[in-house]
Image (tube, rainbow, N blue to C red):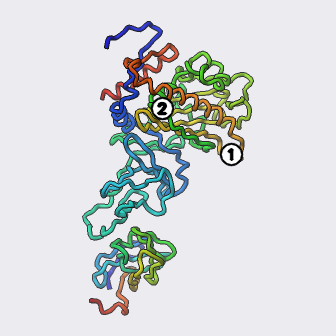
């Protein structure tokens, strides 16, 4: 392939196969999703001992549960005996233990092997050694983050620092009290597109005026094509007559007490690589988690978080949910329309980024550096 | 009599397995609401240690297939186990817990 020199306005994207080749996706699973911290569940979903969810993280299926001691733990969802998948539901309530349906190997909620047929006659089996395989876990912003690496990267520099850098200060995100907020609504989107198309879409706003009429009306500067993500510490200002970040600018809720005047009436957006997007507005937080399932399929779970009192009061959340639900649907449709082009010979060498998208090149360099390992 | 442990060594709601009971059969000794109970440790349905089971309301639930045995009578509450486990006498002496075969169990083959 001949390399073409681009005019200064344009920067090359990644070649199409990086978005379409299952072999590339397999490397991403191994070198990105199984090495980095991955936001897998909302801690409040695990509301009592025995509550569990199962999640696809990289190529692994992971059980996340709350133990009798109230600790949240994560394990690979595989029986140590003959390898059967232990929990086959996406969520549920375990009664006492985790029991394999095949030979009844039975594990405690702490992962230890509790019982198995004839186990007392095999006293050389160590119950911890043959317990479930632990997955590293941290809780932050009210989410359970897991890491499949043997030696996880430091959570502070890999995860927390992304929020600090975007918001322009250590701990600024604390103002939104995200760990104390309650899930008012969750919508899950099954998107037929590569996960990187979704990240790139989230990073730029060149498309905003075209596909997001409601969002652009709410945040007039978005019509210029520059996303909040292109700057540090910058929040896009609400239009003057909007009372709240909702579909029609009305029907907002009490401001989260930790959000100060400087951050009021503004919209902030953060990407935490490799799979989290956080949107911050004064009275709620929109928290997206991507689960890459295949090279051309990504499940996105989106939570709308409000002050617990707002959710408990039964307040009408529909106007705020509708705004970003529409934005999501508009974005994911665009990503799905883009996915087939990734396999086209027209895109063999990739496409181009315009100046308001140039910061995406840094994401591309990051992906390539991870894959080059 | 077989010595099990010192009083206080079994936490409330838990049990220990005694590998060789008074007649050589493994026994489980439970500590429930201040009382001690001893039963045969092996579930009558499939080989599993009842000492690893879950104790509730003076009964133990087998960790494998959830048959419940009354710690006082040894009777199963329902399937899959149908046959009761034997119960044994617990003796507390000088701060130690002992287990003893009931006369009804004697003689033992």
Q: Residue B86, image x and y in percent?
A: 38, 84
**Residue B75 visible to the viewer:** yes
Q: Give SS at disc 1.
A: helix
Q: On the image, numbered disc 1 is attached to which residue?
A: A309
Determine whether A325 is above or below A229 in the image: below
Which chain does tag 2 point to?
A
**Location of residue A180 by image quarter:** top right
Q: Residue B40, image x and y in percent?
A: 36, 80
Q: Residue A15, image x and y in percent?
A: 38, 21
A187 or A145: nearer the eye? A187
Q: Earlier in the sequence, mark 1 or mark 2?
A: 2
State which quarter of the image contains the C terminus of chain B.
bottom left
State which quarter of the image contains the N terminus of chain B.
bottom left
**Residue A159 visible to the viewer:** no
Residue drawn 50% across and 41% down? Answer: A140
In the image, taking residue B45 as reference, residue A173 lies left or right, namely: right
Residue drawn 29% across and 61% down? Answer: A126
Q: Which mark is residue A20?
A: none
B21 or B96: nearer the eye? B21
Q: Which mark is residue A272?
A: 2
Q: Residue B4, image x and y in percent?
A: 34, 78
Which chain does tag 1 point to?
A
B50 or A263: nearer the eye? B50
Q: For label 2, count other residues whose C-alpha is less than 10 Å away and answer few (under 14), some (14-19) or many (20+).
A: many
In the image, taking residue A121 as reference, residue A231 lies left or right, namely: right
User: For the residues marked 1 and 2, what is the alpha-carbon distance in whole angstroms?
Assistant: 28 Å
């Amino acid at each position: 392939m001949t390399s073409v020199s681009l005019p200064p306005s344009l920067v090359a994207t990644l070649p199409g196969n990086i978005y379409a080749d299952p072999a590339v996706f397999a490397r991403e699973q191994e070198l990105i999703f199984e090495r980095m911290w991955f936001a897998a569940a909302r801690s409040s979903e695990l509301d009592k001992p025995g509550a569990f969810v199962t999640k696809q993280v990289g190529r692994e299926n992971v059980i996340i549960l709350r133990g009798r001691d109230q600790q949240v733990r994560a394990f690979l969802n595989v029986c140590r005996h003959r390898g059967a998948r232990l929990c086959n539901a996406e969520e549920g309530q375990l009664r006492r233990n985790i029991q394999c349906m095949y030979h009844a190997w039975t594990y405690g909620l702490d992962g230890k092997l509790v019982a198995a047929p004839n186990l007392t006659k095999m006293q050389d089996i160590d119950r911890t050694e043959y317990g479930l395989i632990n997955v590293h876990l941290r809780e932050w912003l009210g989410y359970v983050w897991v890491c499949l690496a043997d030696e996880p990267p430091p959570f502070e520099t890999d995860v927390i620092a992304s929020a600090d850098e975007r918001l322009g200060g250590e701990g600024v995100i604390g103002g939104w009290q995200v760990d104390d907020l309650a899930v008012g609504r969750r919508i899950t989107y099954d998107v037929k597109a590569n996960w990187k198309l979704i990240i790139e879409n989230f990073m730029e706003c060149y498309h905003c005026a075209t596909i997001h009429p409601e969002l652009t009306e709410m945040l007039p500067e978005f019509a210029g094509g520059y996303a909040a993500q292109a700057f540090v510490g910058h929040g896009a200002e609400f239009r003057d007559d909007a009372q709240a970040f909702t579909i029609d600018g009305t029907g907002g809720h009490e401001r989260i007490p930790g959000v100060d005047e400087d951050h009021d009436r503004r919209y902030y957006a953060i990407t935490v690589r490799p799979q989290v997007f956080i949107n911050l507005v004064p009275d709620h937080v929109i928290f997206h988690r991507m689960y890459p399932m295949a090279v051309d399929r990504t499940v996105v779970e989106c939570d709308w978080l409000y002050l617990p009192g707002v959710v408990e009061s039964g307040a009408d959340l529909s106007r705020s949910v509708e705004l970003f639900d529409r934005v999501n649907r508009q974005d994911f449709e665009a990503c799905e329309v883009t996915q087939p082009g990734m396999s086209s010979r027209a895109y063999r060498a990739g496409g181009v980024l315009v100046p308001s998208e140039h910061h995406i090149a840094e994401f591309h360099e990051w992906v390539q550096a991870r894959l080059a390992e | 009599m077989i010595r099990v442990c010192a009083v206080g060594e079994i936490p409330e709601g838990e049990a220990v397995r005694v590998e060789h009971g008074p007649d050589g059969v493994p026994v489980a000794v439970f500590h429930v609401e201040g009382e001690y109970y001893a039963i045969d440790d092996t579930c009558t349905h499939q080989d599993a240690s009842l000492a690893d089971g879950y104790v509730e309301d003076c009964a133990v639930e087998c960790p494998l297939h959830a048959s419940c045995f009354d710690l006082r009578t040894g009777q199963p509450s329902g399937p899959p186990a149908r046959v009761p486990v034997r119960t044994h006498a617990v003796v507390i002496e000088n701060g130690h817990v002992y287990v003893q075969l009931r006369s009804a169990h004697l003689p033992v083959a």
